[in-house]
Image (cartoon, helix red, strand yellow):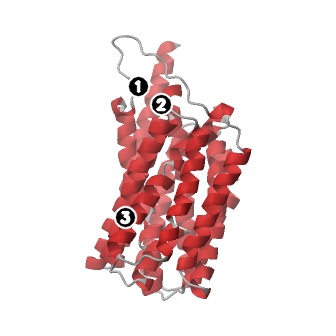
C-alpha cells in the first residue's frame, strides 16, 4: 500500500519534483537489492521462520517515522532502510513455500502465494486511496505498519518452525565448480531479462499513478481502485489459468505471452485517451502480463537451485527485481519529464516486444537442448 502511493504522495503532498520522487523510489530499489541478497544469505544459514518474523516486525516499525518526516534526504534514507528490511522477507518466503510443496505442485504453490499477495494488494490500494482522500496520505503509513506487525505475529504463532531449518549443503566432488548462482550463465542471462521485464512492469507503480493524476485528472481513490483491480484479477484468474497451463510442454514460453500482453497494455496508455473504461482495459492487459509471466519465472528459478542454495537463487531473483525497482522510476520518470508520458509508454511497449522474443528464444533453445539430451540417453 505504501509503495503503490509513494510517488503520488511525494509529488502531490510534499511537492517533490518527479526527478526527486524517482530518486526516492530508486532508494527503495537499492535497499531491495541489498535486503534481498542478505535475506537469501541468511535463509540458507538460519531458520527461515526467524527471517520472516523479523523482517515483517522491523519493517512495520520503520514506517512510523514517515508520519512526521518530510525532508527529502531523510525520507530517501528511511525508504532505503525500510526496503532493505522488508525485502529480506522475499527469498525466505519463497523458500518456505517451496519447502511445503512438491515438484508437482510447486508452480501452483507459488501461484497460491501470489494469490494471497494480490488479495492483499486488491484490498490495500483501494483502502489506501480511500484513506488518502478522506483522512490523508500519512495514515497509509500507520495502517501499513500495523498490518506488517500483525502478519509477523501470525507467522510467529502459527507457521511450523521445524521444517524451516537450513538444509545442509551437498558436498561437491573435487574438480567440480561450486554450485554458486554466479557460475550459472543461463540463469544470469535470465536475471538480466527479469531486470528489463521488471523495469517495464513496475511503471504500474512508478509512473502510471502520476500519469493518471496529471493527464487524466483521476482522484486518488479512483487510482486506488484501478491498482486494486490488478490484484483482484490475479486473485480470480491466476490459479485456474496456471492449473491449466502447467500441464503443457515447455510452459516457460508463456512468459513470452505475458510480455506481449504488456506490449498491448502500454500501447493503450500511449493512446492518451482519458476514458476510464480504457484505463480498465490497460489494467486487464498489465495483469495478464503478470499472471502469465511471474509464476513460471519463480518456478524456473527454483528448478535451477539445489537443496543448499535455494535462498541464494531466490535472493538473486529478488535482487533482479530490486534493480528494476531502481530503474523503473529513475528511467521512467526521467523519460516522462524530458519527453512526455507518450514517449515513455511507447518505449515500454517496444522494449516489451523485444523482451518477448528474447524469452521465447531462450526457453525454446533450452527445451530443444533438453530434448536432445533425453534422446541421446535413450
**Residue 309, labelled with which disc?**
2
Q: Position of residue 27 (x, y in %)?
A: 36, 62
Residue 27 in the image: above or below residue 376: below
* Residue shown at 66% from the left, 43% from the top: 109
* Badge nearest the viewer, 1 or 3: 3
How far, Cα to Cα, is label 2 from label 3? 31 Å
Name the spot of residue 204 as percent of width and height, x first: 47, 68
Lower position in the chain sequence, tag 2 or tag 3: 3
Can you say which quadrant of the picture contains the N terminus? bottom right
For label 3, the residue is 77
Is residue 99 something one can see in this rendering?
yes
Badge 1 is on which residue?
179
Q: Secondary structure at mark 3?
A: helix
Cα distance, mark 1 to mark 3?
35 Å
Whether residue 338 sits left or right of residue 177 in the image: it is left
Which label is found at residue 106?
A: none
Asked if the residues shown at circle 2 and circle 1 are in contact, with their CB atoms under 8 angstroms apart, the answer is yes
Residue 132 screen position, x and y as percent: 57, 82
| Residue placed furthest toward the top | 174
Q: Secondary structure at mark 1?
A: loop
Amino acid at each position: 500500500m505504501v509503495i503503490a502511493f509513494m510517488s503520488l504522495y511525494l509529488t502531490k503532498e510534499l511537492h517533490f519534483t518527479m526527478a526527486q520522487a524517482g530518486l526516492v523510489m530508486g532508494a527503495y530499489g537499492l535497499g531491495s537489492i541489498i535486503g534481498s541478497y542478505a535475506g537469501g544469505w541468511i535463509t540458507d544459514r538460519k531458520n527461515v521462520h526467524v527471517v520472516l518474523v523479523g523482517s515483517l516486525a522491523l519493517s512495520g516499525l520503520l514506517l512510523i517515522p514517515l508520519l512526521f518526516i518530510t525532508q527529502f534526504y531523510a525520507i530517501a534514507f528511511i525508504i532505503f532502510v525500510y526496503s532493505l528490511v522488508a525485502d529480506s522477507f522475499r527469498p525466505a518466503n519463497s523458500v518456505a513455500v517451496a519447502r511445503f510443496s512438491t515438484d508437482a505442485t510447486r508452480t501452483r504453490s507459488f501461484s497460491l502465494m501470489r494469490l494471497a499477495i494480490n488479495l492483499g494488494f486488491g484490498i490495500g490500494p483501494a483502502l489506501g486511496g480511500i484513506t488518502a482522500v478522506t483522512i490523508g496520505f500519512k495514515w497509509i503509513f500507520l495502517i501499513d505498519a500495523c498490518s506488517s506487525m500483525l502478519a509477523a505475529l501470525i507467522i510467529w504463532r502459527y507457521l511450523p518452525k521445524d521444517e524451516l531449518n537450513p538444509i545442509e549443503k551437498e558436498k561437491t566432488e573435487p574438480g567440480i565448480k561450486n554450485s554458486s548462482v554466479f557460475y550459472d550463465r543461463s540463469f544470469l542471462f535470465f536475471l538480466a531479462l527479469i531486470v528489463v521485464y521488471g523495469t517495464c512492469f513496475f511503471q504500474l507503480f512508478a509512473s502510471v499513478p502520476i500519469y493518471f493524476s496529471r493527464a487524466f485528472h483521476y482522484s486518488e481513490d479512483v487510482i486506488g481502485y484501478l491498482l486494486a483491480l490488478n490484484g483482484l484479477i490475479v486473485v480470480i484468474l491466476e490459479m485456474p489459468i496456471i492449473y491449466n497451463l502447467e500441464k503443457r510442454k515447455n510452459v516457460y514460453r508463456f512468459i513470452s505471452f505475458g510480455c506481449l500482453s504488456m506490449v498491448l497494455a502500454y500501447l493503450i496508455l500511449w493512446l492518451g485517451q482519458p476514458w476510464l473504461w480504457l484505463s480498465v482495459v490497460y489494467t486487464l492487459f498489465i495483469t495478464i502480463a503478470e499472471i502469465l509471466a511471474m509464476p513460471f519465472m519463480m518456478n524456473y528459478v527454483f528448478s535451477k537451485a539445489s537443496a543448499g542454495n535455494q535462498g541464494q537463487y531466490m535472493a538473486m531473483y529478488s535482487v533482479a527485481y530490486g534493480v528494476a525497482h531502481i530503474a523503473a522510476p529513475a528511467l521512467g520518470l526521467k523519460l516522462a519529464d524530458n519527453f512526455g508520458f507518450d514517449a515513455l509508454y511507447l518505449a515500454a511497449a517496444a522494449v516489451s516486444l523485444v523482451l518477448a522474443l528474447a524469452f521465447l528464444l531462450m526457453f525454446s533453445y533450452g527445451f530443444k537442448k533438453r530434448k536432445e539430451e533425453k534422446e541421446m540417453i535413450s
